[in-house]
Amino acid sequence: MSARENLASVLNAIRESCRQAGRPADAVSLVAVTKAWSPEAIRPVLDAGHRLFGENRVQEAQGKWPELKTRFPDIRLHMIGHLQTNKAADAVALFDTIETVDRPRLAAAIAREQARQNRRIDCYVQVNTGEEPQKGGVEPGGTESFVAHCRGLGLSVTGLMCLPPVDQEPAPHFALLANLARVQALPCLSMGMSADYGAAVEQGATHVRIGTAIFGPRTAPRPAAPA
């Protein structure tokens, strides 16, 4: 099927997952992940009316989204990959939401750039629910204090995000993230991807990040080095 057809299928599946979970059909927003996809590949999804997208790398996003935004000014762009502190200025300028705020240096860099650019964006704190040493994110027990730290810097923290361990059942991790968000009255929960978004919707996701189910398989890029 085409990307446009896949998009319709995924949106229908999300609505059905909402129905089964007893949630409103429009309770979950689809962040279409376009990492490694060209503007030509993305255009059919834009032409179908979708406007919410996610990118993993600032430099790649800079190469395709500014022009697309001139044609489709209502695009909303989420940064969903590891963000190096030296890319904070570019990220603040381009993205509407940064989902991967995970350390004090990055939070401070974003705060400085927001003030310098006179631009305010939404931020999600990334939580390392599996406490994996190789993965970004704050530990669950440190979430409350880190959210408070970010807000003290002037960041608009509106949600939490997680990437469960690939070798574990994701539902308990989604439940943990949902509970952390409830405790802090955060309205947004970004969790769930192509293989597990049904479980994420059941646990209260407000945003699911789906690329492969829409655009097809791709070769994963090497992870960026931490800043």
Image (cartoon, rainbow, N blue to C red):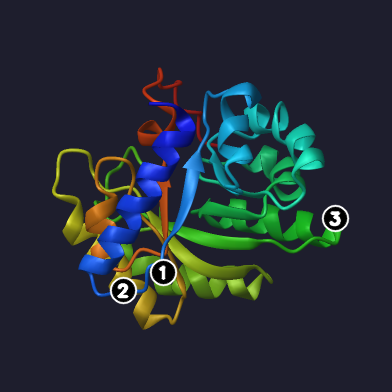
Q: Position of residue 98 (x, y in %)?
A: 58, 53
Residue 136 visible in the current orientation: no
**Left or right: where 225 falls relative to 176:** right
Give me the residue at 36% from left, 45% from top.
10
Q: Report the amino acid beneath label 1.
A: Ala
Q: Return the x and y of residue 103 as percentages of the image width and height.
A: 51, 54
Given this view, does label 2 or label 3 mark the residue nearer the observer?
Answer: 2
In primary-sequence order, the first of circles 2 and 3 is: 2
Quadrant containing the C terminus is top right
Residue 113 figure quarter:
bottom right
- Taking the spot 48% from the left edge, 67% from the top edge, the residue there is 159
What secondary structure is marked by label 3? helix
Q: From mark 2 to mark 1, how far is it between C-alphas?
A: 7 Å
Q: Looking at the rendered structure, which numbered label has been put on residue 162?
A: none
Assign a secondary structure to mark 2. loop
- In the image: residue 160, left or right of residue 140: right
User: Circle 3 is placed at which residue position?
Assistant: 117
| Residue underneath mark 1 | 27
Amino acid type of the residue that numbered disc 3 sits on in the rendered structure: Gln
Please state which amino acid type lies under the numbered disc 2: Arg
Instruction: Write the residue at 24% across / 47% down.
Output: 196
Can you say whether 104 is above or below 176 in the image? above
Up/down of 221 relative to 161, above or below: above
Residue to which mark 2 is pinned: 23
Q: Residues within 10 Å of mark 1 (few under 14, many from 20)?
A: some
The label nearer to you, 3 versus 1, is 1
